[in-house]
Image (cartoon, grey):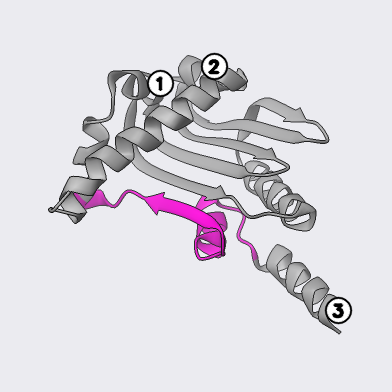
Amino acid sequence: MKNVFLAISVCFLIVSCSSSFQGFYNNHKADMGTTSFQVPNFFKAVLSNISPEVKSAIGNITDFKFIKFETINDLKRQTLIKEMNDVTNSGYTDVFRKNELNQTRIISFKEVGAIVTDAIIFNSTETETTAYYFQGNLNPDKIKSFEDESIFNTFSNNLMQSYKTNVNPFFNPGN
């Protein structure tokens, strides 16, 4: 009976998931084993204080979301990959896609003319899945460089460290 309920829940989740990054984010931000943040409008000043390396990589940002799944099994991972495929199939152009048994990496853009306005960077391994969403006037060459795994990992670590450093003093005055 448990397996039937799980299968029905997964089917409902797949069908009910919006094909936007905001829908993906909203559907999963409360999942167990998930870390997520969305920078609200009043907090955009944090983005201007990001390290020069990170700022150079992402450009002028008006919206930024991050979600990381640390507790995943194979079914959850496949569901996340399918949902992200649905999102990137709704008006995005893949500039890089790597589908392997142990890793899926997707870099997708939305463009207006020659300007990249939205970017999704998605990476899923057997132990962890991470997704970034950026909106603004973005540097396409820098974002495309994330297809290199070492650049992506360095960027991810620098961004998380910079975000934590800039957030903690505001929300935890004692630190």
| Any part of residue 26 in sight | yes
Residue at 23%, 47% in the rendered image? 168
Residue 151, magenta (yes or no): no
Which residue is disc 3 drawn over? 4
Residue at 32%, 39% in the rendered image? 163
Q: Quadrant of residue 17?
A: bottom right
Q: Quadrant of residue 54?
A: top left
Discs 1, 2 touching: Cβ within 8 Å: yes
Residue 30, magenta (yes or no): yes
Q: Label 1 is placed on what type of residue?
A: Ala
User: Magenta segment, which residues?
Assistant: 17-42
Residue 145 marker:
2
Question: Where the N terminus falls, by quadrant?
Answer: bottom right
Residue 75 marker:
none
Q: Label 3 is placed on what type of residue?
A: Val
Discs 3, 2 touching: Cβ within 8 Å: no
